[in-house]
Image: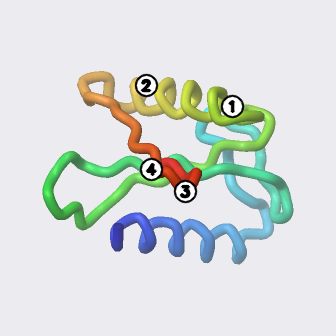
Amino acid sequence: MAAAVRALEAIGAAHGHRAHGQVCASCHGRIDAGDTFHMVVVFPAVDAPNSALAMPVCGQCAGNQADLDRRAEEIIRTLRPQLRLFSITHPEGGRA
């Protein structure tokens, strides 16, 4: 979990300091400060991961959870087709 926090803090800090915003990992459209976006966070399948890959996805590409899940899988499969993908859900409503 610490790796996720570090990845999201780094992305948030970078997003706040960039006048030109971020680029959506799915459509490659611009995400400006104040725009709605989601983060896809990918961890290696190890007992204690110390790194993570985090990618922004714009609100247009991820209008709902199913869209976000589909887009995340497409992005990851494009980057690393050999990876085994899985999703973890939390009873409180979050997803990992």
Looking at the image, is mark 3 or mark 1 earlier in the sequence? 1
Kindly indicate whether the residue at mark 3 contacts the one at mark 2 (C-beta within 8 angstroms): no
Q: Residues within 10 Å of mark 4 (few under 14, many from 20)?
A: few
Residue 92 numbered tag: 3
Dot 1: element: loop
Dot 3: element: loop
Observer-side mark, 3 or 1, equals 3
* Type of the residue with mark 2: Thr
Q: Is residue 48 above or below residue 82?
A: below
Q: How far apart are labels 2 and 3 at the CA level? A: 31 Å
Q: How far apart are labels 2 and 4 at the CA level? A: 20 Å
Looking at the image, is mark 2 or mark 1 earlier in the sequence? 1
Disc 2: which residue:
78
Q: Residues within 10 Å of mark 2 (few under 14, many from 20)?
A: few
Q: Position of residue 15 (x, y in %)?
A: 67, 68
Q: How far apart are labels 4 and 3 at the CA level? A: 12 Å
* Type of the residue with mark 1: Cys
In the rendered view, does 9 fall on the left or right side of 13? left
Kindly indicate whether the residue at mark 1 contacts the one at mark 4 (C-beta within 8 angstroms): no
Q: How far apart are labels 3 and 1 at the CA level? A: 30 Å
In the rendered view, does 18 fall on the left or right side of 9? right
Observer-side mark, 2 or 3, equals 3
Kindly indicate whether the residue at mark 4 contacts the one at mark 2 (C-beta within 8 angstroms): no
Kindly indicate whether the residue at mark 1 contacts the one at mark 2 (C-beta within 8 angstroms): no
Observer-side mark, 2 or 4, equals 4
Q: Is residue 45 above or below residue 12?
A: above
* Type of the residue with mark 4: Ala
* Type of the residue with mark 3: Glu
